[in-house]
Amino acid sequence: MPGALDIAGNRLESDDMALIIQKFGGTSVADVDRIKQAAFRTQAEVNAGHQVVVVVSAMAGVTNALVEYTDQMGALADAREYDVVVSSGEQSNAGLMALALQNLGIQARSWLGWQIPIWTDNVHGKARISGINTENIVSRLEVGEVAVVPGFQGMGTNNRLTTLGRGGSDLTAVALAGALRADRCDIYTDVDGIYTSDPRIVTRARKMDRITYEEMLEMASLGAKVLQTRSVELAMNQNVRLQVRSSFVEDLGTFVVSEEEIMEQQIVSGISHSRDEAKVTLLQVSDRPGVAAGIFGPLAESSVNVDMIVQNVSEDGKTTDLTFTVGQSELETAVTVLREKQSDIGFGDIVADANLVKVSVVGVGMRSHAGVAQTMFTALAEKGINIKVITTSEIKVSVLIDAEYTELALRALHTAYGLDEDND
Ligand code: ASP
Ligand code: MG
């Protein structure tokens, strides 16, 4: 079948040329030696006859240091200059990578965001990509030159340099993959893939061969540190095949792909958790129209991001309790804002609890299977773990539990859904 891909995303016909985006994260290009090592990964693809675009991050820690310089300069007056400063780590790495490739005898040149250009809006510090001119790069790829692109940067319609928000080099890579219709976008990082649960807690967690875009988006704790969320959304929209793989080992990583590519879908693909959870309960909230708007409006205005919300019907028709969760760093703001509005909103008291964890089971297979949540509740009950709040979406069931049960819950659920690796 022409165009068929093997599991690594390579065309099955070995003489077929593919276009591959290789993105190297900060730890993969953390110093000159590592840049030289990364260049060998590019050389391997070039030698296999492929066209390659390399996207580089700044050296690990450099962007933080640059942000810190702008802080030290005083209150931020001009975000355009902030972008000039913080984008520079990627720029120097792009030049260094081009040099490393040239030293291996590979034709290569750097393409800064404005030279391509990668067009964005003018929201400096977190600009959105609006379009990419691919002609120039394509003509050079066609004559066998490797394009090296600094991640994280673009050019606004004001002709000023912009940056795409922290972690934005992933976005650069995916956007280029989409615009160039690349066969594959390899994200080289310091982990070797996405696991069914946090392997530091669940020793029987397995590296997944494949995961769907939607699962990746839902499994924040497993994926978000590895791939920037916006880049996964873009990959899903543009149907870019992503591979998360390690720079430091040869093995294949985890492919992030569309649902159609996964034949034998597990019902539950992974168990994730988030420790950054705090719960707020408002007692005796008056039961009348407009109350929810009165509570969540002021929270939104104070940029408090609310996650789970639970409200019961009131027994007496007068008052009910309402519980919601926020990130731990936002708990104090949430409580302060609501106390200020206590008489306007009309409630009895506020109870806050920050010692919680959210555990989620995720899998696109649960769309077509019943009983998924029941397995979760039973497994937790058998361990004597009390569930405080439950929410569900089409492909996820989440529960809030006491933080001290995190490890126990993750392991029990991993076993209950048959995800354990047979390592005995
Ligand atoms: N260097 C930028 C950051 O640290 C972008 C990236 O590496 O993805 O946020
Ligand atoms: Mg990153």
Image (spheres, rainbow, N blue to C red):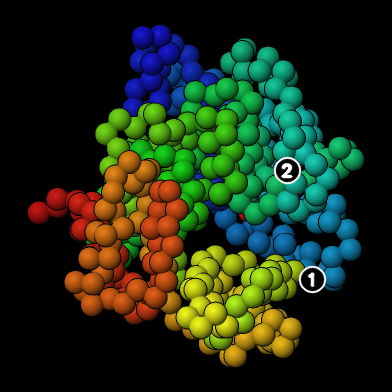
**Label 1 neighbourhood size at 10 Å, few (<14), some (14-19), many (20+)?**
few
Q: Which residue is mark 1?
A: 72
Furthest residue toward left: 424
Q: Which residue is mark 2?
A: 128
Identify the disc placed on residue 341.
none
The picture places residue 108, in percent across and down from the top left corner, at 63, 25
Mark 2 residue's CB less than 8 Å from ligand 1: no
Q: Nearer the viewer, mark 1 or mark 2?
A: 2
For the residues labelled 1 and 2, the Cα–Cα distance comes to 27 Å
Q: Secondary structure at mark 2?
A: loop
Depicted 142 relative to depicted 359: above or below: above
Q: Secondary structure at mark 1?
A: helix
Q: What residue sits 51% from the left and 66% below the top?
A: 308
Q: What residue sits 83% from the left and 45% below the top?
A: 122
Q: Amino acid under label 2?
A: Arg
**Label 2 neighbourhood size at 10 Å, few (<14), some (14-19), many (20+)?**
many
Quadrant in which residue 248 is drawn: top left
Q: What residue sits 21% from the left and 58% below the top?
A: 416
Between 30 and 188, the one lying in front of the other is 188
Between 94 and 177, the one lying in front of the other is 177
Which quadrant, please, contains the N terminus? top left
Depicted 365 relative to depicted 424: above or below: above
Quadrant in which residue 234 is drawn: top right
Furthest residue toward front: 316
Q: What residue sits 65% from the left and 42% below the top?
A: 151
The picture places residue 188, in percent across and down from the top left corner, at 47, 42
Depicted 400 relative to depicted 423: above or below: below
Between 36 and 204, the one lying in front of the other is 204
Asked whether the residues under the numbered discs 1 and 2 touch, taking CB atoms below 8 Å apart as contact, a structural biologist would say no
Depicted 14 relative to depicted 28: above or below: above
